[in-house]
Image (cartoon, rainbow, N blue to C red):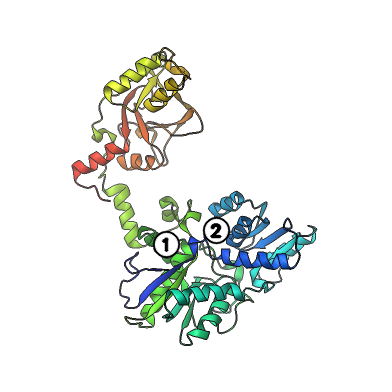
Amino acid sequence: MVRLPGVGGVDERVSAEIVGKLEYMNPGASIKDRVAKHIVAQLESRGVPRDALLIVAGPGNLAISLAMLQRRIMCLVPERTSADRVRLLKAAGVSDIVRTLDGALPGSPEHPVEIGRRIASHQPGAVYVDEELGDWDLEQCYNELASEMLEQTSGQMDALVLGVDTGNAATHLSRALKAQRPSLKVVGVEPSNSAIGEQNIANPLARRWLCEDIGRAYAPRALSAGSVDMWIQVSDNVAYSMARRLIQGGIFAGPSAGASVAAARMYAMSASLQQGQRVVVIIGDTARNYGDTLLSDDWMLAHDLLDSRMLDELQRKQHDQYRAASIEDLQLPAAVTVSEQDSMGVAISLMAENDFSQVPVTGSGRRLIGYLTLSAAQTLIDNGTATRSMPVKLFMLRFAGRATLAPGADSRQSGAAAIASTTSARKQYWLITPETPLSELARFFETHSVAFVTDASRKFCLGIATKQDLITFLARRHTLKY
């Protein structure tokens, strides 16, 4: 449990203390590790074989936690589940993944319960696992969590804020905590358009949100009436922006955690909590599950999920600091090259004499065809794979495939660069010329280490650029900021 003041602007205009219970620090990176442990114990007590197929419905966290406990898993996830989460499920050993319709109502053929039960009926010995159905006794699971929070706060909790999905956590934690702190308020968090708090199931298929792990198009049966004192709906924009701010502050939280922290701020201000009062918020998911979404500037921009301040910061970072400058403004020295017919010894000597870490390699007509790195060349010589008399062409890293323009690049403003790879000696070729904007080059360096600048015809290598050249340029302009 950590104090959140100063993290992502959490304490702005808030007098009460907001602390986070970091459930994403569990081995499976979510609160579902606790649930999985108790479900496995109950499976064993029921005599279910260890190799029985478990068909698990939900956003995916419970399936990951069960898979980590060496159980055979098939997972039913909503359509909105990110590709990152699906890849993680596969890596955890989940045998099969079935996507289900967002917002399907209980009892409908498209609902995960109906789909899961149909699948289980055709799989001898399979067990359908769904927290929402009440088939599992999770009271002890959440009693343990409640005891931890009371101990870590010395019993001083004025409010608990948590995202709600199945309703189990809200129900059991509310009951356990209020037994010790009757005045405590429980605040349930759901995405905008979710219908848990409003008990509304009208037109559920029209309800859409991006935030995973929280929210339903109906009130789940596991949620006990009165367990939540107040409901707060949080938009995707607020949830994702707060998650990014938490990351900047050292809390590597996912979108649902961003929604919960934002709701904790809203509650503390609306309830006029004062200094000395404390709000505990459960931070239940990790940003590591969202590499292609939350952690991608392009995806966040495309889905309009950055608040105005973060949008301004990103625009300054991507464009304003370069002020329309191009690679030509880097004033790179002329490139020194070697021929593919030159010996390894010649290439190594050239790099050593000029303090180069790599050298472009040319073919017939002095056309750029690849490059050789000093570290690789020396290693090949030292381990006996190559000799100094052998030609460079046997060991160079070659550019492969047709020239590919960087996203948004104009063919007249493109240049050449090698995409770094540790799995193949053939490299994709991107075009970069002296006219390529530095903002575009900066994005290139997010995934690559070196750029070889050519003429527009990709024939001659004119220079070599690295991220250090960009940093030096910004320092000269006095616009370098971290």
Residue under numbered circle 2:
28
Disc 2 is placed on an element classified as loop
Question: Residue 450: where, in percent of width, then height?
Answer: 36, 33
Q: Residue at x 46, y 34 (%)?
A: 421
399 sits left or right of 329 in the view: right
Separation of residues labelled 2 and 1 (CA atoms): 19 Å
Left or right: 53 in relation to 334: right
Q: Label 1 amino acid?
A: Ala
Residue 168, x across and y down, in percent: 59, 74
Residue drawn at the location 43% of the way across and 64% of the way down? 237
Q: Is residue 333 above or below residue 262?
A: above
Residue nearer the viewer, 430 or 182 = 182
Q: Is residue 364 left or right of residue 97?
A: left
Residue 109 shows in the view: no
> Which quadrant of the view contains residue 474?
top left
Residue found at the far bottom of this picture: 182
Q: Is residue 198 above or below residue 397?
A: below
| Above or below, 179 relative to 339 | below
Q: Pinpoint residue 446: horizontal percent, then vertical percent.
A: 38, 43
Characterize the local packing of mark 1: few (<14), some (14-19) or many (20 or more) Cα atoms within 10 angstroms: many
> What amino acid is found at the position of numbered circle 2 in the picture?
Gly
- In the rendered image, which quarter contains the N terminus? bottom left
Between discs 2 and 1, the one toward the N terminus? 2
Q: Look at mark 1 in the image and give the residue it sits on.
A: 243
On screen, residue 302 versus residue 13, left or right, reads: right
Between 272 and 479, the residue placed more toward the observer is 272
Taking depth in this image into account, of 384 and 317 the one nearest to the observer is 384
In the image, residue 193 lies at what x, y percent? 52, 71
Quarter of the image for residue 10 reads bottom left
Residue depicted at x 38% and y 81%? 270
